[in-house]
Image (spheres, helix red, strand yellow):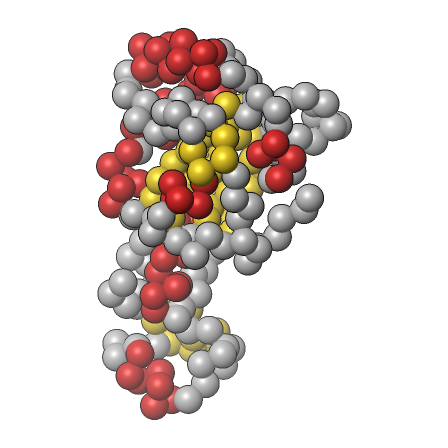
């Protein structure tokens, strides 16, 4: 199965480190970050889950829930979580799905045979409260994710949803934004963007970031 942006994130019911999870019910009215790992007790994964745990307050501030996944069983997750907490100096307060039968991995196309026939690659999905897939990033097994980028994209998605803007390259929260080409009526522009805008080209209109 190939997932595309805007698709409904597949629902699933699977065991996890906090018990059985029905995914859509677990998301509720929040955003979600679902991310997979090749295996428990592996070094890069240990640092990634530790970083996710340390970002708990930043994720909560954005109304985002995190959920990890590997194809190892719950019992293995429990021991690994202790290692993560001890080595990374954190408390793992988010669930890790135990996708032993690889059901979720198949739904989300997380196993890439040219990388491994059995283990998941580092797939990451940002899912909005309507259960729509808004971002897909896939890293190889050897490369840890950039969680600053994950937070940056969540900020951009939430801003653009709320304020009818687009974000330029390397945008960070608070930077100038772009007025999309779908908005052409000057009266609407003045109403939406009272601080005005600069237009080095007619198609490139830059305005201060509006309040979210």
Above or below, comparing residue 133 to residue 59 in the picture: below
Number of numbered callouts drawn: 0
Residue ID at (38%, 36%): 66
**Residue 102 placement: quadrant:** top right
Image coordinates of residue 11 in percent, x first then y, are 52, 44
Image coordinates of residue 124 in percent, x first then y, are 52, 38
Residue 111 horizontal side relative to residue 129, left or right: right
**Residue 105 placement: quadrant:** top right
Residue 135 horizontal side relative to residue 17, left or right: right
Above or below, comparing residue 184 to residue 118 in the picture: below
Residue ID at (49%, 54%): 132
Between 124 and 130, which is closer to the camera in this rendering?
130
Between 147 and 113, which is closer to the camera in this rendering?
113
Q: Quadrant of the N terminus?
A: top right
Can residue 96 be seen at all in this image of the molecule? no
Above or below, comparing residue 169 to residue 125 in the picture: below
Q: Quadrant of the C terminus?
A: bottom left
Image coordinates of residue 81 in percent, x first then y, are 38, 15
Between 22 and 162, which is closer to the camera in this rendering?
22
Can residue 197 be seen at all in this image of the molecule? yes
């Amino acid at each position: 199965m190939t997932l595309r942006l805007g698709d409904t994130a597949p629902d699933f019911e699977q065991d996890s480190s906090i018990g059985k999870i029905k995914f859509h019910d677990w998301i509720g009215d929040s955003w979600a970050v679902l991310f997979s790992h090749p295996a428990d007790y592996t070094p890069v994964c240990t640092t990634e889950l530790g970083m996710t745990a340390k970002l708990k307050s930043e994720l909560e501030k954005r109304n985002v829930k995190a959920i990890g996944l590997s194809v190892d069983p719950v019992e293995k997750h429990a021991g690994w979580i202790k290692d993560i907490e001890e080595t990374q100096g954190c408390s793992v307060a988010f669930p890790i799905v135990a996708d032993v039968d690889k059901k979720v991995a198949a739904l989300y196309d997380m196993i890439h045979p040219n990388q491994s026939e059995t283990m998941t690659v580092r797939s990451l999905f940002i899912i909005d409260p309507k259960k729509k897939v808004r971002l897909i990033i896939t890293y190889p097994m050897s490369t840890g994710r950039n969680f600053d980028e994950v937070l940056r994209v969540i900020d951009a998605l939430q801003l653009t949803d709320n304020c009818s803007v687009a974000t330029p390259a390397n945008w960070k929260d608070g930077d100038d934004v772009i007025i999309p080409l779908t908005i052409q009526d000057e009266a609407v522009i003045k109403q939406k963007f009272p601080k005005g805008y600069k237009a080095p080209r007619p198609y490139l209109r830059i305005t201060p970031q509006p309040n979210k």
